[in-house]
Image: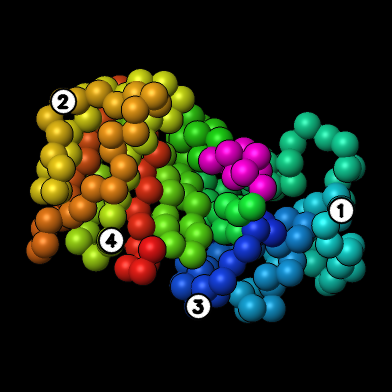
Amino acid sequence: MNRCIIIGGSDITDYNRIKNYIGENDFCIYCDSGLYHMDKLEAEPDLIIGDFDSHPEPHLDAETIKLPTEKDDTDTVYAVKEAIKRGFTDFVLIGVIGRRFDHTLGNLAILLMLEKENLSGKIVDDYSEISVISEKSGTIEIADGCKYFSLLAAGGEASGITIEDAKYSLKDASLTMEFPLGVSNEVLPGKTAKVSIKEGRLFLIIITDRNA
């Protein structure tokens, strides 16, 4: 099945970059104020979800699920859960990192939820790609086209971490949430960095914008 693109309402400035992540056959879900990005993303909605507290109810010719304002799930979490019910297994979330840090953390938790369910997910913003890796991920390869990559413990200690062909290498090491040792690593020129983990989970943040 094709990927599901979840579009939230956080700021996007580099629309040309973000549009590269949306394929012609991807299923696009706009969450409430994510609709403000629709014209610049040039991607029609397959589904619209929201309580419409931050965007007027759109009344577009697209399936729409209107949610109550008071609810357990945020619009974005509801959208992901709805897409899972519909059989999607691969997710790209855009417009979900921004000024509301509480929402940002909540959306990072979506990546943990997807990983736990053995589903694939990443968050993309103007500068980076964020995903969760674990022992189930196998060896992750990172090309030298990025500016930096960072590895941060997600939800507790991560151990058995090996990093090869990077400026700062590790062998069977541990990372904790209390000490962000894994920030701002670099792939060696002409190499492909390799990352693996034996236990726990890590946020992998790849900084793709050379000006970041």
Give the left or right position of residue 71, taking residue 106 as reference. right
Residue 9 x/y as whole percent: 69, 59
SS under mark 1:
loop
**Which numbered mark, 1 or 4, is in the foreground of this view?**
4
Q: Indicate the quadrant where residue 78 lies.
A: top right
Q: Calculate the distance from the C-alpha at mark 4 to the C-alpha at mark 3.
A: 19 Å
Q: Is residue 46 above or below residue 50?
A: below
Q: Amino acid at mark 1?
A: Asp
Q: To which residue does mark 2 refer?
A: 172
Q: Could you tell me the amino acid type at mark 4?
A: Lys
Say whether residue 95 is left or right of residue 197: right
Badge 1 is on which residue? 53
Above or below: residue 31 compared with residue 173? below
Look at the picture and state if 72 lies above or below 122.
above
> Which numbered mark, 2 or 4, is in the foreground of this view?
4
* Mark 3 lies on residue: 16
